[in-house]
Amino acid sequence: MTAVTYARPMSEANPGSGASSEGPVVDGPHDPEHDPRASYALEPEYVARLTDRVLATTGRTTQVFSPINGAPVANIPQSSTDDVAEAFRRARVAQAAWARVSVDERARILHRLHDIVLDRQAEIIDLIQLESGKARKHAFDEPLHIALTARYYARTAHRHLDTQRRPGVVPVLTKVELNRVPKGVVGIISPWNYPFTMALCDGLPALLAGNAVVTKPDAQTMLSALLAAQLLEDAGFPRDLWQVVAGPGRELGTPIIERADYICFTGSTATGKIIAKQAAERLIGCSLELGGKNPILVLRDADIERAAEGAVRACFSNAGQLCVSTERMFVADAVYDRFVERFVARTKAMSLGATMDWDADMGTLISADQLETVTAHVEDAVAMGARVLAGGKARPDLAPYYFEPTVLEGVTPEMTCFGNETFGPVVSIYRFHDEADAIARANDGEYGLNGSVYTRDTARGRAIARQIKCGTVNVNEAFGATFASIDAPMGGMRESGMGRRQGAEGIHRYTETQSVATQRLIRFGPMLGMSDEGYAKFMTASLRLMDKLGRA
């Protein structure tokens, strides 16, 4: 798919991330040659095929626009609480049949998705860019991550899901098997910042484990999530197995939680706490990947060029709108000046722009709200004495919500950006003399999602990593080494979340463990005229014998 337009006057004079409407309404003439708001960014037939997957009967729509240039993208149908109930009804019917499908067949379909995603990556990337405004190389990370996830779980399905033998209490006579039973219907509430990968990556292991999914993607990036749903069906998953609803989280979040057997959420810490409370009231499990104020430690023996290159990716991938991106850097005094010089030079040399080609090193923020937050954090820091080493201002000449990659020095605790997540292309850099002090400062605050350590001594780097209170820590890499290693679990400590995606934990969260024990020949009680006291003595002697034999 390539982005195409068709002439149609639009009503939105000040396009934002979304506005409720019954469809396009004219507010005056727009010239398609000079005003991107005059025509849709996509063919209406293409959009209609995607939005048809939303279960919505309200007749209401929300209009969304591209942050690249304000062009209208689509009118998204809006769901009601009744639609949520219907989505779960359909999902439960589909799940009952799906749970009877063999693990081999589920894995085969999942592996087919791997091939489809790679084959259609250009279409996927185009749509991601139109909706999110990110640079093309950062949009590519999304189909890459889904292909990795699909391949991993398809090839390891039996390792994670097969019935396992466990030792019984009486050797030979007690046989114990551990089954993995699907939970039922999983509710997924996914964010806008990685709209394709976050729409799919948590749901793929849920499907493989025998569950159905009801998902509510973010309103700003619905089409990327709907394309993901279409690709699932193209791969062979039953259509009703993956239900999509659309609407504000404040309206649909609670109805989803009230019906789901498990909840998976990626988003803010404040919302995550509300979801955790609601899940606890129903005694259902949840996994939450939440906010972060992620640190990098550049030690005195670090490779300066490698650290500077990695720091640019760590701080400015997707314009800093990445849960695991870096917002704090702690640099050893011995290399501080050299590192800052190289890091700032690399930052200033970045190619800036909101384009659909591969040339830009950083795209735009997604919305006016994000731009307002980033601008406020930088202006507050500067007003209180922080120094801007690079960037520091909005660039409406590049895109409506564009903000330059920004490096701050001299940030202090009273400044808003010191401990609060900015979620934008802003990083604060600090000098340290003692590594123990740097570790303590990296652990300061309540977050604990991702961290990085740069050092030539990788053994020392790993030892320091174990002291950093983050769910993932990369040595001599920004975030890609952990995020792309699908066999390794990924998630946050403290207020950065609970639960893990990826690896065994990423699929076992969607299953109930069921122990089945078969007892032969003897029973657990006195036999053959043995008294209760005699039985107790016999069992005591048996326990001592098994302990001497080294049995667990």
Image (tube, grey):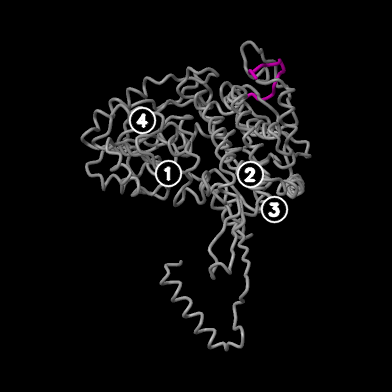
SS type, badge 4: strand
Rendered image quadrant of residue 242: top right
The answer to whether residue 397 shows anywhere in this view is no
The Cα–Cα distance between marks 2 and 3, rounded to whole angstroms, is: 21 Å
Q: Nearer the viewer, mark 1 or mark 2?
A: 2
Q: Earlier in the sequence, mark 4 or mark 2?
A: 2
Q: Residue at x 51, y 79 (%)?
A: 539
Q: Nearer the viewer, mark 1 or mark 3?
A: 1
The Cα–Cα distance between marks 1 and 3, rounded to whole angstroms, is: 32 Å
Left or right: 370, with 298 as reference point:
right
Left or right: 311, with 487 as reference point:
left
Left or right: 90, with 314 as reference point:
right
Query: Is 6 one of the magenta-colored residues?
Result: yes
The Cα–Cα distance between marks 1 and 2, rounded to whole angstroms, is: 25 Å
Q: Earlier in the sequence, mark 3 or mark 4?
A: 3
Which residue type does callout 4 highlight? Val
Q: Earlier in the sequence, mark 1 or mark 2?
A: 2
Judge by depth and name the residue closer to the eye, 367 or 264: 264
Answer yes or no: do the residues labelled 2 and 3 have beta carbons within 8 Å?
no
The secondary structure making up most of the magenta span is loop
Q: Badge 2: few (under 14), some or many (20 or more) residues near its Cα, within 10 Å?
A: many
| Rendered position, 316 above or below 540 | above
| Rendered position, 393 above or below 164 | above
The Cα–Cα distance between marks 4 and 1, rounded to whole angstroms, is: 24 Å
Judge by depth and name the residue closer to the eye, 322 or 505: 505
